[in-house]
Amino acid sequence: MDLVIEDVVKRYRGDVTALHGFSLALKPGVLGLLGPNGAGKSTLMRILATVTRPTSGRVTWNGTDILAHPDTLREVLGYLPQDFGVYPNLSAVEFLEYLAAAKGVPRGTARQRIDDLLELVNLSSVRDRPLGDYSGGMRQRVGIAQALLNDPRLLIVDEPTAGLDPEERVRFRNLLSELSGERIVILSTHVVSDVEAVATEIALIAGGRLIQRAAPEQLLREVEGKVWELRVASADLPAVRERHLVCGVLRRGDGAHVRIVSAQSPAPEAQTLAPTLEDAYLYHLAAHRAAAA
């Protein structure tokens, strides 16, 4: 089972290019597609979900070109887009029954599947309430359920934890981990902690380009010895931000403890820190922007 993206370009009117020759090959597991807003993540997800066609390039599922034969992938696809809409007058059960029919899930199988999924996303107690009465987080959980209706081989989730409270976010992360065995899961987000919790591999995207692809451990090794803590007076913070890539600030009684990512020590008194995935993410983004500039 493999998904291969080959030199995909997507241009929009007005000479706007969302993707620049993007290439990536995927096997079963969880890929965290991590990048800032506007990086091209959602455009790529829509192309992979056969919702949008690329300007050029090719995408294959198990060797079959999905642009020429989209149904090959659609039969085994689960997709939660960033902007997920519902029919407000339908209940969760009615809505999922409608989508199950549209996806070709047999009626008998669909009923049990819907029961299981509503339990999984913690909506069983409100299954018969109109979706118009649901909160944003509850609607997002319905979206997660519909993406899993056909037990997909390829699961694409675009900013899936938006609107979820911390407990729901943890529940969803655990769910993705459980689902990753014999399927390809793509988690597209700008939230580093979501990727850190579940991804077996991470692809960093910026400006429509793939800038790095590696296991989380490799990304952390690449910034080993490049993360520093520097204590400064609060009044000096603006100057520090101008000179260095600041990843965080802790206010304490003895001043501001500034977390800095830099290949060189920012000051003789700076102390090295163990890197985090967020440090690695910001380091690679900064390097990409410097190269582009």
Image: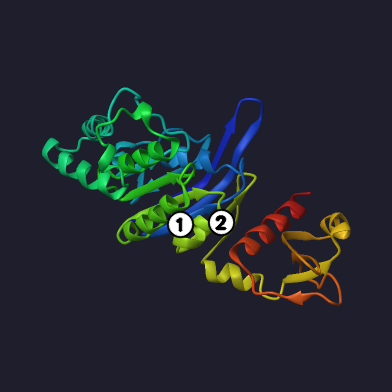
Farthest top residue in view: 89
Left or right placement of residue 244 versus residue 129 in this view: right
For the N terminus, the quadrant is: bottom left
Mark 2 vs mark 1: give the one in front.
2
| Mark 1 surroundings: few (<14), some (14-19) or many (≥20) residues within 10 A | many
| Mark 2 surroundings: few (<14), some (14-19) or many (≥20) residues within 10 A | some
Residue in the image at 28% along x and 50% along y = 120
Residue corresponding to mark 1: 31
Question: What type is the residue that disc 1 sits on?
Answer: Leu
Closer to the camera in the image, 8 or 136: 136
Q: Where is residue 168 drawn, in percent x and y?
A: 41, 50
Q: Where is residue 152 drawn, in percent x and y?
A: 29, 47
Residue in the image at 75% along x and 59% along y = 246
Question: What type is the residue that disc 2 sits on?
Answer: Val
Farthest left residue in view: 108
Q: Is residue 2 visible?
A: no
Residue in the image at 28% along x and 37% along y = 126
Q: Where is residue 254 drawn, in percent x and y?
A: 81, 69
- Looking at the image, is 217 positioned above or below residue 114? below
Whether residues under marks 2 and 1 lie with C-beta atoms below 8 angstroms apart, the answer is no
Farthest front residue in view: 253
Q: Where is residue 161 drawn, in percent x and y?
A: 46, 47
Tell me how many marks there are: 2
Which label is found at residue 192?
2
Q: Secondary structure at mark 2?
A: helix
- Looking at the image, is 127 positioned above or below residue 269? above
> Quadrant of residue 290 in the image?
bottom right
Please report whichever mark, 2 or 1, sits nearer to the chain's N-terminal start: 1
